[in-house]
Image (cartoon, grey):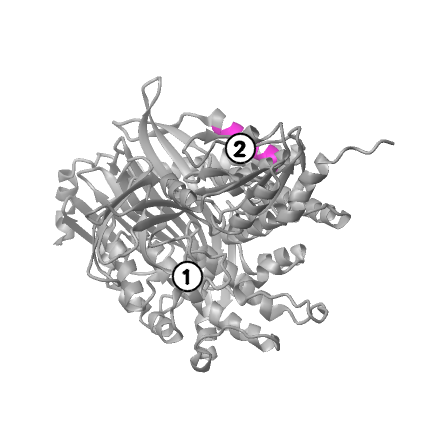
Amino acid sequence: MKTIPFISLFLLLICFSSFAQNEVILLRPETGKEYIYQFNKSIYHQSEDGEKLNEFLWTKILEIEYRTTEPDNKKLLFVTVSKNTLQKPGEIPFAYRDYEYPEFQNEYYGGARTDAYENLVCNILFKYEFNEETSELKLYNRDEVLLAAKKRLDKKAFDQVSKNRQIEAFNTKAIPQITKSVQLLFQVKSEMLDPQKYDVDIATKDHVLSVTNQRWDEKPGLYTLNYSINDQEKFLREYQSISLDSTKHSRFINGNYYSLFYNEESIKLLNLKEKTGTRLIVSGTVSGVINKKVTLAILRNPYGTELYQETVFLDESNTFHIETELENPGLVFLLFGQSNSSAELPTISLYAEPGSNIHLIANGEFPWDVEFSGDFAAAQELLYNFNKEYEWLEQRMNFNSIYWWWSSNMKFVNLRDAIDNFDVKSMAYKEAIPAYVFDFVRNELKANLMCGVLEFLSTWEYKQRVNWGQVYFPDEDIVDLDYLNKVLNEIEIHEIYNANGVFSRQFANSYLSYYLQTVKKVRSVNYFGFEIVSTPSNELRFYGDLPNKIEIAKALLAGPALYGQIAEMLLQEKTTIYNQESEAQIYRKNEVEKYLDLMLRLCNDPGFSQSLEGIISTQSEWDKKDYVPNTKFFNEKGEAKYLKDFLGNKPALFYVTKNWSKERYYFDELAKENPEINFVLVTEGSNIQEWMDYTKRANPVAYQLFLINHKVQLGSIFKSGKGHFIAYDKDGVRIGFDRNMVSGMNLCKQNLQPKKKN
C-alpha cells in the first residue's frame, strides 16, 4: 500500500474525480446491486489503556438497493432497516434492547420512552430520489412511510394520544435520522485538517482511497476522522468519526474520575453484491457411497429448528444437482443416505445466500477429501475441515429427536479440543472469507459447540435427580464439569446469536432447558409407575407451566432468541391434539391466545408475524366443523387428489403423519377389515418418485396421499404436524380429532349406527 505525506494531500484529492470544491466526496450507487451497511453510534468514557467504559452502543443495519421502478421507469433508492438495537457492552447482566423484538410484556406500552419511535423504523420501506449529479437524496414516499407506521401503531393498540405522539416523533426524528445516515453514504465530508494538530495519513491501493486523521491531544472537538472509499465504483467502504466533549460533572468509574466522553459514529460495508434472485444451486460429485440418496436440508421458518428437505439421487457418474428457493442467508446441509432412518448420516454443512451457486467434489471414502468451488468456497472449507477434524460429520439434523446431540457422535475429548482450538482453527480462514460471512459461520460453529457443553451439563444434572432406570451418559467418567461451566459462563448468547442460524436457535433452546433444570428446586410428586420419561435437552418441552416457562425465558433471553423460543412454546400448545376438549384445555387455549396476541402486537418483524398469523389462521379454520383444506396432494400413481375426493359417500379417517412407515400396516389391516370407511394415509416428502416407489413396494390397502413439501409442510395445513387422525362423517362433516388409530376409527363407526329415536 502506498502512503502519501500530507504535503501531497491537496494534489491527491484533486486527482480523485469524486472530490468537489466544497470538500465533499460524491459517491453514487449502481443499479442492480445490493449494499448492506452497519451503522454504529456509541457514547463512552475511555480509560488510560483504551478500554471503553459505561458505553451505550446503538446499531442499525441498512439494506440498500438502487433500481428502476415499474411502470413509471423511475430510478429510486430502496432502503430498509433490518436491524435496530441498543446495548451496554460489558454490563452484567447483559443490557440489551432490540427494537425489532421489544421486551415481551404488556407494560411495555405504558412507558414514556423517548426512543419509542425506534420500534417503527424496522422493516419499513423508505424510497429516495437520488440526484446522480449532486448525490443528494429526497424522500419520495413519505406518505407511504407514515401510513405504514400508523398501521403498525394501530396493530399495537395504542390510544390515539400515544399514537399521535409517536407518529410525530417518527416524522421529526426517525425519518430525518435515516435520511441523514443514507445521505452520508454518498456525500462524504473530506475536510482538510490542520497537520499541526492532527496526524494525517493517506493511502491508495487498487482504486481505494483510505484517509485517517487523529488529533495529537485529547480535548473537546473532533478527535478522529477516518474513511475509505472505492473511487472507481463510487461507494463507501468504511467511515469513522470520534468527537470529544466535556461532562458537566466528572464521572467516577472503577476508582477513577472521567471528565471527557467520546461520541463515536462508524459505518461499515458488510456486503455488496449483484441482485441475483432467490434461486440456490448446489451440485457435486460424491464417491464411495452405497446409498445414492442426497438430501438438502434448509431452515425456512423464522423460528424453530425444523428443516425443509429436498431429495435427489446420484446418477451413474455419482453426480447430483439440486435447485431450490432460499430467502435468507444461512447454513444449509447436505445429507447422504436414507434420511428417514434413525441413523446419523454423513453431513456437509454449507453457507449459502439467495442466488448462490455451490459446487463440491468429494473424493475417496467417507470422511471424504472435499474440494469446494463456486460461492463462499473458503467458508465451506472452514465448516467442513473443522467438522472433519473433530469427527463431527455424522449428524441426524433432527433437533426434535430424543438424543439429537448424542447422535452426532462427538465425544467429550473432541468437544474439548474443538473448543480449545476454535480460535486458531477458525481465524486461519478470516482473510479468505467476507467478514459478515466469517462472523456468521464462526457463530454457528460456536453455538453448536455450546449445545454440546449444555448437553453434557444437563445430562449430569439430570442424572443427579433420576434414581430409576438408566440415563444415557457417554464419557461420564472423563467429563470435566468445572471446565464446561467455565466455558458456558464465558459465552454471552446474544453476542453470537444468528437469527437465521439453526444452531443458534438450538443453543437458545438448550440454554433455557439447562437453566430450567438449575432453578427448579421443587416439583410435584408423580405416583409410582407414572414417572415422566424425558431427556435433558427436551425437558423444557414437557414442562407444563406455560406462564412460568415464558417468565424464565424472559429472564434469560432477549430479541429474536426470546421471541423464537416463546413462539415455539405457544405453537406447541396451539397445535396439540386433544381427543375431547375439557374446561382446563379451554382455559389453556385462551392463555395461549393471550400470549400470541401480545407477540403479534409487539413484534416488528413482518416475516415473523406473518408466519405466526398463517398458523393461527389455519387453526381457526379447523375450528369449523365443515372445514376441509383445499391443498393439492398426489396419489401413488402421481395423480392430483384432494381431501374432499374421499368425503361424501362414506365416513373417512385421515391418518396425518410425516413418517412413511409408522403404523402403516396396521392402518391397512383396519382398512381391509372396515371397507365401509375410507382410510386415507396422508404424508409428505420432497421427492414424489421416491415415495411412489416406496408405496408400490408397501402394496397398501388404504388410500395414499402425498404432499410435496418444498414450500409447505403438513403442519402448515393441518391442526398439527405431528401424527394424528381426523374423522369425518358420511356427509363430509368432521366428527373429531384423535391421537389413537382405533378410537379415531370408532368415531367413524359410531356415525354409521342408526340414530336412536326419542
- What percent of the width, then of the height, locates residue 541? 58, 58
Side of 165 where 338 appears, left or right: left
Cα gap from disc 1 to disc 2, whole angstroms: 35 Å
Residue 277: which quarter of the image?
top left
Residue 533: which quarter of the image?
bottom right
The mark nearer the N terminus, 1 or 2, is 2
Q: Is residue 447 magenta?
A: no
On the question of residue 249 being in view, the answer is no
Rendered residue at 58%/77% (across/down): 464
Q: Residues within 10 Å of mark 2 (few under 14, many from 20)?
A: many
The relative height of residue 660 versus residue 688 in the rendered view (above or below) is below
Q: Residues within 10 Å of mark 1 (few under 14, many from 20)?
A: many
Magenta residues (range): 145-157
Residue at mark 1:
447
Rendered residue at 46%/42% (across/down): 684
- Is most of the magenta stretch helix, strand or loop? helix
Residue at mark 2:
149
Residue that sits furthest to the top in the current view: 72
- What percent of the width, then of the height, locates residue 646? 56, 31
Number of numbered labels in the structure image? 2
- What percent of the width, then of the height, locates residue 413? 37, 76
Residue that sits furthest to the front in the current view: 673
- What percent of the width, then of the height, locates residue 335? 34, 54
- Identify residue type, mark 1: Ala
Residue that sits furthest to the right in the current view: 758
Side of 731 where 458 appears, left or right: left
- Identify residue type, mark 2: Ala
